[in-house]
Image: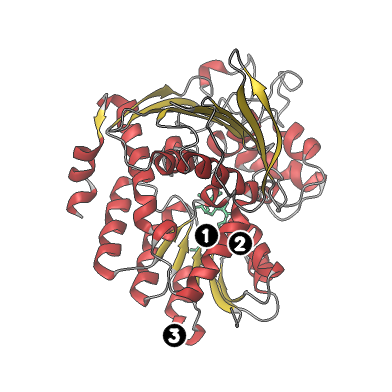
């Protein structure tokens, strides 16, 4: 790789500036930002520095692409802008990294699938977890056959009660009509990982769940519309906003407190809670997305997979259990620990493990003394709340920039086709949850994107 790529960035928020921009700043030999679009001047300044061109809207940057001459475009805009922006970049013929969800609605996804088909657009979708050492190790164990034929996959997406309140009750993803269902916004990563591990799309999808708790009837007696208006439940409510944004996050100036505004002093934060969305009582918001949901997927091989997502968890991480005819795997994404039990005396781990993954212990267990191995996946990047994605953010940028140089964006794991099933699985799950029962996935897909 002998030159630094020219990147244009649409949206200089948490993803554009913090996740991907941070990688670019750390790798000036690999890439540099030549143009940034964002309506917030401070965000423009922070990412553009003194050299990149600035635009107040993504459309302005796209209109100037001929002059800007980027090698690729990063689309890190709010969900609702993904489809028009991706279509415009497709028309310009440039490779792009499009944040997930590729589209927040089924109609938008169908439209985008049509655009990709017509233009041959080179679209990589931000499914960062596929690139994290933890998930690459899980996939390597499965692909090597160490577990035999897969019987079950259980993924638990522990959203964290504080994080759910921030994003899915008070924040951007609280209302399905304004954004998207939780099963897409939060768990399309998990569906993508299940699809990846299964090696095929599911035969059927069924899902159940509801908005159990964050409803007006569950408000404590006398609770006002805002935590800061003298809430009588301030000391007992787990969701009392000042405890999170002012006290617990006092030393944090990035995600998620940037959502409050630009004055992040204690007084500035309190003022933002008094007037902005993040100070609202969690029982008095305009939220409607499910706060717990369980999805069951059946595959043609007989494999079944379950995905459990819940707001009411003490951790904000994923747990995974896979059972197979020759072994079992347990993983915990935050710790990076993966335990593999090999039932057969001839059982083996893959000959080589992905970078950043090592075997740290081995032993025997059970009445037959079968072999066990403990692997640890170490993420290089900072694993603060929602940053880094266990090293996936950095690894995706590394892979994307390599693919831009090699001309392979739009193929393999960096393709729209690869990401499409996970989004369709999410929409099918939501249809199932809201009344459709068991969805025949391939027939349902044919009637949706099949005609795009
Ligand atoms: N891959 C992942 O795991 C992951 C994680 C979090 C968020 N996301 C997705 O990434 C996207 C961005 O999320 P975020 O957390 O960075 O949000 P954000 O709000 O921090 O950033 C979005 C930015 O877009 C800017 N913007 C809004 N309208 C614009 C316009 N017309 N033109 C140019 N810029 C405009 C906003 O000012 C903001 O700075 C979302 O689609 C989100 O769902 C993906």
User: Which badge, 1 or 2, comes first in the chain's sequence?
Assistant: 2
User: Coloured how?
Assistant: secondary structure
Image quarter for ligand 1: bottom right
Disc 1 to disc 3, C-alpha distance: 21 Å
**Label whose residue precedes the other's in the sequence (2 or 3):** 2
x, y (%) of residue 360?
72, 38
Q: Position of residue 200 (x, y in %)?
A: 33, 42
Contact flag, marks 1 and 2 (Cβ < 8 Å)? yes
**Picture disc at residue 298:** none
Task: Indicate the position of residue 317 as horizontal and vertical percent values.
Answer: 62, 35
Q: Does the residue labelled 1 lie within 8 Å of ligand 1?
A: yes
Please name the residue that numbered disc 2 is placed on.
20
| Neighbours of disc 3 within 10 Å: few (<14), some (14-19), many (20+) | few
- Residue behind mark 1: 76
Q: Residue furthest front?
A: 346
Residue 301 in the image, given as x and y percentages of width and height: 30, 32
């Amino acid at each position: 790789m002998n030159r630094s790529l020219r990147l244009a960035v649409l949206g200089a928020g948490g993803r554009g500036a913090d996740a991907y921009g941070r990688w670019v700043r750390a790798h000036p030999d690999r890439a540099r930002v030549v143009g940034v679009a964002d309506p917030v001047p401070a965000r423009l300044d922070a990412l553009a520095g003194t050299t990149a061109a600035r635009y107040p809207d993504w459309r302005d940057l796209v209109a100037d692409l001929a002059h800007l001459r980027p090698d690729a475009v990063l689309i890190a805009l709010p969900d609702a802008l993904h489809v028009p922006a991706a279509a415009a970049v497709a028309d310009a013929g440039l490779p792009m990294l499009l944040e997930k969800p590729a589209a927040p609605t089924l109609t938008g996804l169908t439209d985008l699938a049509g655009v990709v088909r017509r233009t041959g657009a080179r679209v990589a979708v931000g499914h960062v977890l596929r690139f994290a050492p933890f998930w690459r190790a899980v996939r390597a164990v499965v692909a090597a056959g160490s577990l035999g034929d897969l019987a079950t996959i259980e993924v638990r997406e522990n959203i964290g009660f504080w994080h759910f309140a921030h994003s899915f009750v008070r924040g951007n993803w609280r209302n399905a009509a304004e954004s998207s269902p939780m099963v897409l916004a939060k768990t399309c990563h998990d569906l993508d990982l299940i699809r990846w591990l299964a090696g095929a799309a599911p035969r059927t999808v069924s899902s159940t769940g509801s908005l159990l708790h964050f409803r007006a009837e569950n408000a404590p007696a006398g609770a006002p519309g805002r935590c800061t208006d003298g809430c009588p439940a301030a000391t007992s409510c787990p969701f009392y906003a000042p405890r999170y944004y002012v006290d617990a996050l006092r030393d944090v100036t990035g995600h998620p407190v940037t959502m409050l505004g630009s004055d992040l002093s204690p007084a500035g934060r309190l003022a933002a809670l008094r007037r902005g969305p993040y100070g609202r009582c969690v029982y008095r918001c305009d939220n409607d997305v499910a706060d717990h949901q369980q999805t069951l997927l059946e595959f043609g091989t007989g494999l079944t997979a379950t995905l459990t997502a819940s707001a009411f968890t003490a951790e904000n991480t994923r747990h995974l259990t896979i059972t197979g005819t020759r072994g079992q795997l347990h993983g915990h994404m935050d710790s990076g620990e993966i335990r593999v039990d090999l039932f057969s005396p001839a059982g083996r781990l893959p000959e080589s493990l992905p970078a950043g993954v090592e075997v740290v212990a081995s032993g025997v267990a059970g009445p037959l003394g079968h072999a066990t191995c403990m692997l640890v996946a170490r993420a290089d990047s900072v694993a603060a709340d929602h940053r880094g994605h266990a090293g996936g953010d950095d690894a995706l940028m590394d892979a994307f920039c390599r693919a831009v140089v090699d001309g392979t964006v739009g193929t393999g794991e960096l393709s729209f086709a690869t990401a499409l099933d996970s989004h369709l699985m999410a929409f099918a799950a939501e249809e199932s949850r809201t009344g459709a029962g068991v969805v025949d996935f391939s027939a349902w897909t044919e009637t949706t994107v099949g005609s795009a």
